[in-house]
Image (cartoon, grey):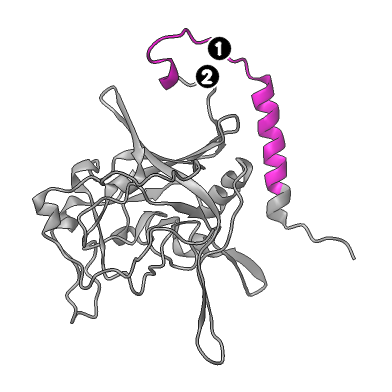
Amino acid sequence: MGTYVHPWLCSTVALVACLNAAVAQEAVPAVAPTAVSEAAPRTRPATLLPGLRIDLRRRVVEADARVVFDPQRAKAGPTPPDSLVPRAGGWLELVACTPGMREYESLVAVACRPRHLHQALLMVGLKPGKPRRVHQGEAMPRVEPARGTPVEVTVRVEGDGLVREEPVGRWVLDRWTGASLESSRWLFTGSTLHRVEGREIYLADLNGTVVSLVNFGDDVVCRATPLTDRDDGQAFAANVALIPPLGTAVKLRFRAAPPRSTTRPGPSSRPSSAMRSGRPIRPPHETSPSAPE
């Protein structure tokens, strides 16, 4: 019996070959050693698909996105405990979604399809793991934590002649502690495939779960946390002071995360007193920022 090769792998190998050929033929201009030479890249990322670029030499994936967070949402606060209808935007559960999907609980919406982002991450050498799973047993359910290659996720904002790139977790606050999620770890979990009426569907394409703060079970990239969309206690809010206006074009960048430092990280940035006024319904059950890879 022959070995089954998923069509995704075939298309990804073909894309890698084409891009490698393009990079090999590209003339690399000399860069004078100046104070800003590092900010001027020696190579241009190749466009993989509209809204999605890849730099094979630096192993960076760049996705176009736009801000969907409205500062007015921050004034809404969390949903009251006795309400059966979630209050749109009173808290966050994702960093990035797809247009029209989960925008009410996200910061940005990416222009590319989640499956194409998955392919691009494969092309820079990242290996997908699996989203969080709950296996129903005869006694108690068994939880399989999310796992995957650690990924560094940054957000890049350009405008008025200035460029700012920072960890995307800096745009998110823990309502309970008042600290940012700057030091968060992210995992390339790779969503999952489901067969529906004879067709394989990449679940993140259907639900728009691109970069999540808590486990949904179909995330392309997920923050390393035991929290889920069912028990996060509405714990996360936007760091309004850092987020550009609604509709601003930004770029999300993905690369392999550097090895974790053994030293204790410094204090996270604190929000303004206005942002600290909101409180989650209950404290989050997040005892550790990390999860098994």
What predominant SS class does the magenta segment belong to? Answer: helix
Please tell me which residue is depicted at 57% across the width and 63% down the height of the picture.
130
Q: Is residue 22 magenta?
A: yes
Res. 229 image quadrant: bottom left
Question: Marks 2 and 1, how far apart in space?
Answer: 7 Å
Q: Disc 1 residue type?
A: Pro
Q: Position of residue 115 (x, y in %)?
A: 56, 54
Instruction: Identify residue for label 1.
Output: 29
Question: On the picture, is 178 further left or further right than 35?
Answer: left
* In the image, residue 234 above or below residue 269: below
Please tell me which residue is depicted at 66% across the width and 32% down the height of the picture.
19
Question: On the picture, is 41 further left or further right than 122?
Answer: left
SS for tag 2?
loop
Observer-nearest residue: 30 or 113? 30
* In the image, residue 184 above or below residue 92: above
Residue furthest top as drawn: 32
Please tell me which residue is depicted at 68% across the width and 38% down the height of the picture.
16
Query: Where the N terminus falls, by quadrant?
Result: bottom right
* In the image, residue 245 above or below residue 55: below
Q: Disc 2 residue type?
A: Arg
CB within 8 Å, label 2 to label 1: yes
Observer-nearest residue: 156 or 222? 222
Observer-nearest residue: 145 or 234? 145
Q: Position of residue 61 (x, y in %)?
A: 52, 39
SS for tag 1?
loop
Residue furthest bottom as drawn: 138
Residue furthest right as drawn: 1
Q: Position of residue 287 (x, y in %)?
A: 35, 66
Instruction: Identify residue for label 2.
Output: 42
Which numbered disc flags the more N-terminal residue, 2 or 1?
A: 1
- Residue span colored magenta: 11-39
Query: Where the C terminus falls, by quadrant?
Result: bottom right
